[in-house]
Image (cartoon, helix red, strand yellow):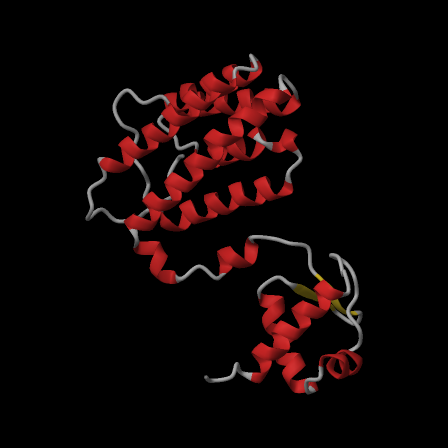
Amino acid sequence: MSRRPIYREAQARLKEYIQQHGMRPGDRLPAEAVLAAELGVSRPSLREATKSLQTLGVIEAQHGNGLFVAAFSFRPIIEQLPYGLVDSDAHFAEILVAREAMEVGLMHFAARLGAGAELEECERLARVMEEREAAGESSADVDKQFHLMLYRGLHNSLVDQVIETFWEMFSRLGDAIPRAKGTEVGAIHLAVVHALRAGDAQAAAASMRAHFDDVRARAAILDPGAARTGVPQV
């Protein structure tokens, strides 16, 4: 059995060190010489390991101040997405299913929040979508704000990051999905807001499913040979 490269071994030991010492985001790591000795690796190997862990978002370097444990983020995952995904309709469909499952499931929790500033802002954003639709303009940027704001009241940083991750993936994978005849994206979003304001989780989930059904229907009418020119409004 082949052994792991030395720098990969140093990576594994450093992650174990962070866990075993109960280090939290913002905690400073020991100086390089001290850390290399504790991990039983050479300083060059440690240096290579720390650079790769910075890329992965595990640790971060502060100029002139050393290395620190980084706060968890999905951003490194996004930045490491294979370029091959960009041209894959199959991956677009897979991400759509995953995102739908998550957002429909979150309706139960969002409905508990009732009316609040976040929901008021979501209604305003949905109205902006309607205005842009009437003017024949894209509202993809507003749509993204809507979905991020919808769960802000949960105060769940993991949910926020996953939603943003899905949006970034859509921007890399998705076509400029056309609006099918009769589709009113703003109205679909307003239906979600109204159901949540009433505290009706079941109606909110049904409206969110209808939203994704609409996205799926619009994606289905795309010309497979069409050029990818923008971000889907989802």
Quarter of the rendering occupied by the N terminus: bottom left
Q: Identify the residue at image location x=64%, y=31%.
A: 154
Q: Position of residue 128 (x, y in %)?
A: 49, 23
Image quadrant assignment for residue 140: top left
Is residue 135 visible in the rendered structure shown here? no
Q: Where is residue 178 in the image (x, y as percent from the top left)?
A: 29, 34
Q: Where is residue 129 in the image (x, y as percent from the top left)?
A: 45, 25
* Front-most of residues 8 and 153: 8
Q: Identify the residue at image location x=52%, y=26%.
A: 107
Quarter of the rendering occupied by the C terminus: top left
Q: Single out the residue that lies furthest toward the top.
A: 198
Image quadrant assignment for residue 199: top right
Position of residue 156 in the picture relative to residue 24 (left or right): left
Is residue 234 visible in the rendered structure shown here? yes
Q: Is residue 38 depicted above or below 196 in this figure?
A: below
Q: Is residue 7 depicted above or below 18 in this figure?
A: below
Position of residue 193 in the picture relative to residue 220 (left or right): right
Q: Identify the residue at image location x=46%, y=29%.
A: 104
Q: Single out the residue that lies furthest toward the front.
A: 1
Q: Where is residue 100 in the image (x, y as percent from the top left)?
A: 42, 35
Image quadrant assignment for residue 48: bottom right
Q: Is residue 129 depicted above or below 82 in this figure?
A: above
* Front-most of residues 149 and 153: 153
Q: Is residue 218 depicted above or below 206 in this figure?
A: below
* Front-most of residues 63 and 31: 31
Q: Identify the residue at image location x=79%, y=65%.
A: 28
Label count reads: 0
